[in-house]
Image (cartoon, rainbow, N blue to C red):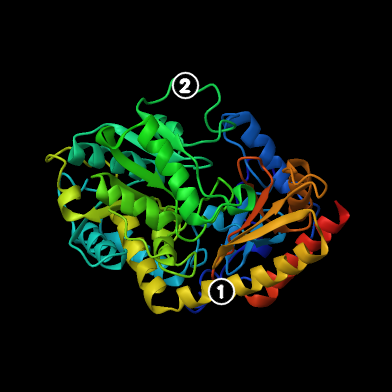
């Protein structure tokens, strides 16, 4: 097979019927299978083609090229079957190519692919907005607007908050990640690889300290007082349009704030006329064992941004919030050519149906028990794991030097690299690069999840 032949090898083709809704995706053998080294020759050809054709700034985690995925596996161009513990960064939460999503997309693509909602509206956009207004936290009147990506949703949430309040300043938090556009880079804390050399950034962005229990050792109330003090002294409520925070940080290291921190920040915002924005792009849609992570902490945001898991793998994002805030923007002030694309909306309606009716929240909790028990046992036996944290199917292990407690990024990278070589895709994260995050699709079978964790344990032991 030549480097330009893009045909899927016969042994990797998916010609079997789709699986039931609890599994999702093509009926692929749910197994870790290595028929070549990673990468195999076909994937290596494609890696070489990528290097020649794709901008160097677009990196990749695993040196494989996918040809099929479903359940808890990704099959590569060489016939290797890898256990997927990343879900495309929390996107394929219900499983890759879920049959309900596939059917909805096939039906819609045969009807029409685009009109631009701002030109000729269509029902599916409205139906997605209605669903988001219903399932997001709080029973107040809400409205939604749809966009293409998480970063675009964050940008628009900030626009809306500024318009509503008539103020300009925005506060984000240490370790936060909000995107790669100019404004969202300004909101994002980590320089490499997201910000370095790409400035200058948007103005009127300020940063406050986050509750990071493993490192600051503060309870939630004290951590909130510290953050609020910084906000009041360095920004001032009279200048502040919005506070934006991930209820559980994603790229920042799956940092779970101490109990009481988020409610205190939200209460301060309400008392001072500041819009409280929950960035639930990674935490949303059953990932944490609740439909949204804000519910874990008993917080009702003014605005909530969503993307990733919203549409079963298709690009879609949203801002949902209090109707009076969402209506602040003038007609034509929100939108975009592709925002709320009809194919993506069809996929989202199918995905939301699965989240609500196919036991996804309960499944996330079951996976969370497995992850915390297995990783907790590793932590008890190995002081290089400093912390295990998270909720539901969003769990992380932080790796440290056991003598000093300092972050150990080199160990983290070595473990992740060894896992991928053995057919298990894991993702690293964290400001210090010392966290492995576990985001398996909720369709992964228990035995496959345990096998993936066995590989992680062996990689750590050998590191």
Q: Residue at x 81, y 52 (%)?
A: 37
**146 vs 389: above or below:** above
**195 vs 285: above or below:** above
The residue to which callout 2 is attached is 199
| Residue 106, quarter of the rendered image | bottom left
**23 vs 245: above or below:** below
Taking 264 as reference, is 83 left or right? right
Of labels 2 and 1, the one closer to you: 2
Classify 10 Å Cα crowding around label 1: few (below 14), some (14-19), many (20 and above). few
The residue to which callout 1 is attached is 16
Separation (CA) of disc 2 from disc 1: 50 Å
Numbered tag placed on residue 239 in the rendering: none
**174 vs 277: above or below:** above
Q: Residue at x 79, y 46 (%)?
A: 401
Secondary structure of the residue carrying numbered label 2: loop
- From the viewer's side, name the closer residue of 212 and 104: 212
Residue 77 in the image: state x and y as whole percent.
67, 53
Residue 258 in the image: state x and y as whole percent.
52, 57
Taking 168 as reference, is 386 left or right? right
Q: Residue at x 15, y 51 (%)?
A: 324
Residue 65 in the image: state x and y as whole percent.
64, 49
Taking 312 as reference, is 417 left or right? right
- Furthest-left residue in this view: 331
Classify 10 Å Cα crowding around label 2: few (below 14), some (14-19), many (20 and above). few
* Residue 316 in view, yes or no: no
- From the viewer's side, name the closer residue of 189 and 121: 189
- From the viewer's side, name the closer residue of 213 and 421: 213
Counting labels gives 2
Callouts 2 and 1 close, C-beta under 8 Å:
no
Could you tell which of marks 2 and 1 lies nearer the N-terminus?
1
Residue 47 in the image: state x and y as whole percent.
67, 40
């Amino acid at each position: 097979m030549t480097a330009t032949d893009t045909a899927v090898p016969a042994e990797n083709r998916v010609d079997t019927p789709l699986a039931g809704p609890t599994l999702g995706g093509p009926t692929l053998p749910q197994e870790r299978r290595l028929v070549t080294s990673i990468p195999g020759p076909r994937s290596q050809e494609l890696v070489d083609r990528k290097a020649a054709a794709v901008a160097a700034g677009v990196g990749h985690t695993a040196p494989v090229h996918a040809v099929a995925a479903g359940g808890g596996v990704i099959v590569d161009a060489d016939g290797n079957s890898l256990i997927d513990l990343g879900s495309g960064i929390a996107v394929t939460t219900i499983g890759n190519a879920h049959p309900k999503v596939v059917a909805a997309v096939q039906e819609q693509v045969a009807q029409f692919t685009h009109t631009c909602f701002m030109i000729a509206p269509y029902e599916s956009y409205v139906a997605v907005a209605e669903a988001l207004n219903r399932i997001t936290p709080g029973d107040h009147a809400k409205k939604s607007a749809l966009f293409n990506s998480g970063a675009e949703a964050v940008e628009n949430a900030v626009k809306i908050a500024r318009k509503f309040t008539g103020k300009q300043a925005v506060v984000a938090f240490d370790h936060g990640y909000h995107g790669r556009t100019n404004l969202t880079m300004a909101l994002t804390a980590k320089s490499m690889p997201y910000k370095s050399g790409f400035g200058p950034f948007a103005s009127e962005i300020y940063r406050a300290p986050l509750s990071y229990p493993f490192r600051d050792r503060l309870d939630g109330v004290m951590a909130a007082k510290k953050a609020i003090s910084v906000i009041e002294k360095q920004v001032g409520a009279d200048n502040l349009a919005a506070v934006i925070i991930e209820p559980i940080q994603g790229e920042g290291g799956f940092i779970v704030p101490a109990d009481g921190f988020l409610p205190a920040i939200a209460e301060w915002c309400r008392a001072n006329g500041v819009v409280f924005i929950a960035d639930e792009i990674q935490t949303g849609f059953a990932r944490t064992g609740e439909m949204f992570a804000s519910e874990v902490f008993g917080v009702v945001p003014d605005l909530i941004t969503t993307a990733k898991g919203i549409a079963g793998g298709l690009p879609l994002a949203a801002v949902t919030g209090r109707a009076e805030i969402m209506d602040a923007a003038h007609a034509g002030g929100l939108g975009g050519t592709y925002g709320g694309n009809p194919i993506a909306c069809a996929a989202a309606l199918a995905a939301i149906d699965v989240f609500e009716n196919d036991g996804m929240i309960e499944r996330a909790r079951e996976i969370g028990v497995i992850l915390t028990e297995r990783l907790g046992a590793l932590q008890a036996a190995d002081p290089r794991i400093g912390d295990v944290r998270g909720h539901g199917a969003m769990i992380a292990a932080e790796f440290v030097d056991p003598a000093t407690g300092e972050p150990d990024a080199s160990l983290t990278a070595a473990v992740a690299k060894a896992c991928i070589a053995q057919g298990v895709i894991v993702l690293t994260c964290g400001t210090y690069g010392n966290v492995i995050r576990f985001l398996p699709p909720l369709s992964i079978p228990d035995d496959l999840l345990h096998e993936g964790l066995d590989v992680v344990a062996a990689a750590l032991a050998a590191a």
